[in-house]
Image (cartoon, rainbow, N blue to C red):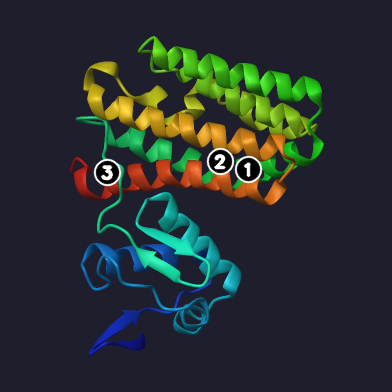
Amino acid sequence: MSNLEKSGSTFQFERVGQTGSLASHVAKQLESQITTGAIGIGEKLPTENQLCELFGVSRTVIREAITQLKSLGLVETRRGVGTTVMRSQPTETMYAYTINPTAVEDILNILEMRLSVETAAAEFAAIRHDSADMQRMEQSLAAFNNALERGDQAREEDYDFHLAISLATKNPFFRQFYEQFNKNVIPRAKLVNTNLDQVATDAYLQRVKEEHEEILSAIRSRDAELARKAMHKHLYRAYHLYEKYQTHNRFE
């Protein structure tokens, strides 16, 4: 256990081991401090150097953990100011009334793989795409947005957008990875429409739309690092959502 004094109180963190995602371990502990009020709204997180020392990890791990907290809307980082807590709970709410626990486990397992594979795919797509790839990705995104306007769940269109990114890598194995799952790689493809909260679903899909646009913008500008971060933000937000559901609503 590592401690850091904070205006009369103390941050307490556990140094992370070498199993699993180090960034996720760090992010979960920081999230817990925020959601329990140990770090209040408007307060700043310890500095990057302090967090490195507290957790016993590299600056890269800390930066990735902060990116995960940003994707949940919990913190905001400003140059010269630091990382400030913006809210005490993630902005996302579960958009389904009930989900089969087996489906949740499948979704989490697939998202874990996607977090590794698709962040790399976004990087390579940013570097290697040509005009035909760009047109395919833009058309896929337009089809997704049109489906939302029709009130559709846009499952197929969501899949097509991510498939278009895999094609832009020019690596056939990225395409094979994605094609083997078909649209079942999209989490809500495993959910029954009658179990969905329509208002919450609409809000969720608008966030997906915005994230897709961020990913495509980064790829279009050939910014590989930004493309990787945008894809990670997109997938991690979904992973966190289902992980929370599994933790608090698992059927026994």
The quadrant in which residue 148 appears is: top left
Give whichever of 248, 76 is nearer the camera. 76
Q: Say left or right for 14 vs 139.
A: left
Dot 2: within a 10 Å radius of its alpha carbon, few (fewer than 14), some, or many (20 or more) residues?
A: many
Q: Where is 45 relative to 87, above or below?
A: below
**N-term-proximal mark, 1 vs 3:** 1
Q: Amino acid at mark 3?
A: Tyr
Residue 84 coordinates in the image, percent (x, y): 38, 66
Read off the residue under disc 3. 245
Give left or right: position of 199 versus 49. left
Q: Position of residue 128 (x, y in %)?
A: 81, 36
Q: Residue at x 68, y 31 (%)?
A: 166
Quadrant hosting residue 155: top left
How many marks on residues? 3
Instruction: Tell me whether the residue at label 2 lies in contact with that at label 1, contact meaning CB atoms closer than 8 angstroms.
Output: yes
| Residue drawn where x is 20% and y is 43% of the image | 249
Mark 2 or mark 3, which is nearer the start of the sequence?
2
Q: Mark 3 to mark 2: distance in Å? A: 19 Å
Q: Secondary structure at mark 1?
A: helix
Amino acid on which disc 1 is placed: Val
Q: Quadrant of residue 83?
A: bottom left
Q: Amino acid at mark 2?
A: Arg
Distance from disc 2 to disc 1, alpha carbons, whole Å, reads 5 Å
Left or right side of 184 for 218:
right
Q: Which residue is mark 1?
A: 117
**Residue 114, numbered label:** 2
Separation (CA) of disc 1 from disc 3: 24 Å
